[in-house]
Amino acid sequence: MEDCIFCGLASGRIECAKVYEDDKAIAFRDINPQAPVHILIVPKKHLVKLHDAKDPLLLGGLMEIASKLAVGEGIAETGYRVVINTGRDAGQSVEHLHVHLLGGRNMKWPPG
Ligand code: 5GP
Ligand code: ZN
């Protein structure tokens, strides 16, 4: 989608601190990190909400990327959080499905 920021990042049209890429997904560091490690894993296909993604292989792939990045970033042992904000009440601010990988600090529960 032309006016979607994450489509722009996924296509390389907009620059980002990329940490992973394959044919279906890209991962890059969040521009406004909420933890020492804050990476976004983004499908290249423009999907808005989690429930728009009907493809279990795609969704599983995003989770696998998150877990491998957690190991690579050195946060697997200390712990990390994987979050998908979907819709207004969850605070989704970018209307293109993305998975947050957060780690490197102690986190509270429940989220605010
Ligand atoms: P949401 O609030 O939708 O769950 O998360 C959107 C995330 O995208 C936010 O954490 C925000 O900082 C990040 N973000 C928004 N625009 C950009 C950008 O242009 N580049 C990068 N790297 N991250 C972005
Ligand atoms: Zn998009």
Image (spheres, grey):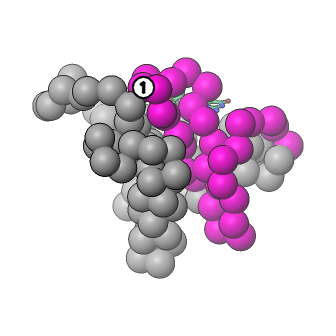
Looking at this view, is 57 or 101 the one in front? 101
Would residue 92 be found to the left or right of residue 106 on screen? right
- Residue occupying image coordinates x 80% and y 52%: 11
Which SS class for mark 1?
loop
Asked whether residue 66 is drawn in magenta, I would say: no
> Residue 15: where, in percent of width, then height?
80, 36
Let me know if residue 81 appears in the view: no
| Quadrant of the rendered image containing residue 9 | top right
Q: Residue at x 63, y 42 (%)?
A: 28
Quickly name the residue at label 1: 35
Expressed as whole percent of the image width and height from the top left, the position of residue 54 reads 43, 73
Q: Tell me which residue sits at (36%, 50%) in the image.
A: 76
Side (left or right) of 95 relative to 112 = right
In-image side of 83 versus 68 (left or right): left
Name the amino acid, label 1: Ala
Q: How many numbered dots are placed on residues in this image?
A: 1
Height in image: 49 above or below 103? Answer: below
Span colored in magenta? 13-42
Query: Quick check: can you spot residue 41?
Result: yes
* Closer to us: 69 or 110: 69
